[in-house]
Amino acid sequence: MRQRATSAAILVPALLLVLAVGGLVVAAAVAIVTVVAAREAFTLLHGAGYRPLPALGVVLAVTVILDAAFPGVIDGSGLLLVAIGIVLVAAAAFARQEAHEGLSTWMSTVFGALYVSLLAFVVRLGHAATTLPTSAPLAQFGPERGWILMLVLAVWAYDTGAFLIGRRFGRATFLSHISPSKTYAGLIGGIAAATIVVGVMLWALGSSPLHALALGPLTALAAQAGDLAESLLKRAAGVKDSGALIPGHGGMLDRVDSFLFAAPVMTLYVVAFLA
């Protein structure tokens, strides 16, 4: 617990500093996190019996992140980059001497790259956000930093609520074959905590808090799904953590797994209903 507290005391101020600066600093920070998380993801895939090409996968993942930092340069550029990446990885997989091994290389490299590159939606969320009303409490914070802050706080709220309520009231578990510690009580507590935080942040950003009734649970469930997806990957690899980069917390992928699914879900909601 002391290690976790010490790590959090270092990571949280760093995150807040990145958000305070905003702009390309956010994109650069996400790109760095993506590199570390991607390397861990490919290590897990290798441990699960696949033969990915980590270097090529990392390049593809970071390229998707950088594309998100400069939206509108080319229409459909994200899909175009993914298509080119699939082609390049396939060409590299041709070097494998056995067809099944080549297919494993192709599929696992593309999967690992696109899986981790979902962090691009953290950057895209900032670009999708609309201008804040001047009367909004966080108007001076700006839409980009404000919406990303809401994402971060919502995921943290879900994790904290699920942990505290699950530890106190958790009895019945779900999907225990993937992660034995997940309880229905924790799930409900996490959803409630995330919904409250999203409601407060929507108000602070000048939007109707009523959207929290949908956006809160959607973000919470996406965060939980992201955590379970990484647990599935770790279980297949036979390891407890994705790495040992952060004392008391595991690897980088362990810290951002919830954001991989929560970021695109929140971005879609913002584009569909709040843009």
Image: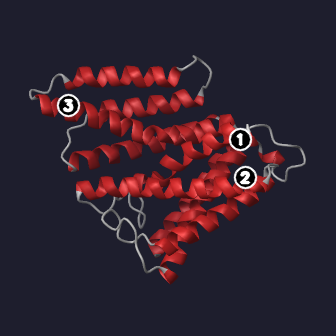
* Residue 114 visible at all: yes
Q: Earlier in the sequence, mark 3 or mark 1?
A: 3
Left or right: 128 with respect to 60? right
Query: Label 2, on which residue?
Result: 211
- Foreground residue among 212 and 56: 212
Answer few, some or many: residues within 10 Å of disc 3's Cα (few below 14, many 20 plus, some between 14 and 19).
some
Residue 90 lies in what quarter of the image?
Answer: top left
Element under disc 3: helix
Element under disc 1: helix
Task: Point out the image quarter for the C terminus.
Answer: top right
* Residue 5 visible at all: no
Query: Label 1, on which residue?
Result: 273
Q: Which mark is residue 103?
A: 3
Q: Residue at 48% of width from left, 59% of height from top?
A: 224
Answer few, some or many: residues within 10 Å of disc 1's Cα (few below 14, many 20 plus, some between 14 and 19).
few
Q: Are marks 3 and 2 in contact (CB under 8 Å)?
A: no
Distance (Cα) linking label 3 and label 1: 40 Å
Residue 39: image location, x then y, percent: 34, 43
Q: Are marks 2 and 1 in contact (CB under 8 Å)?
A: yes
Residue 56: image location, x then y, percent: 32, 29
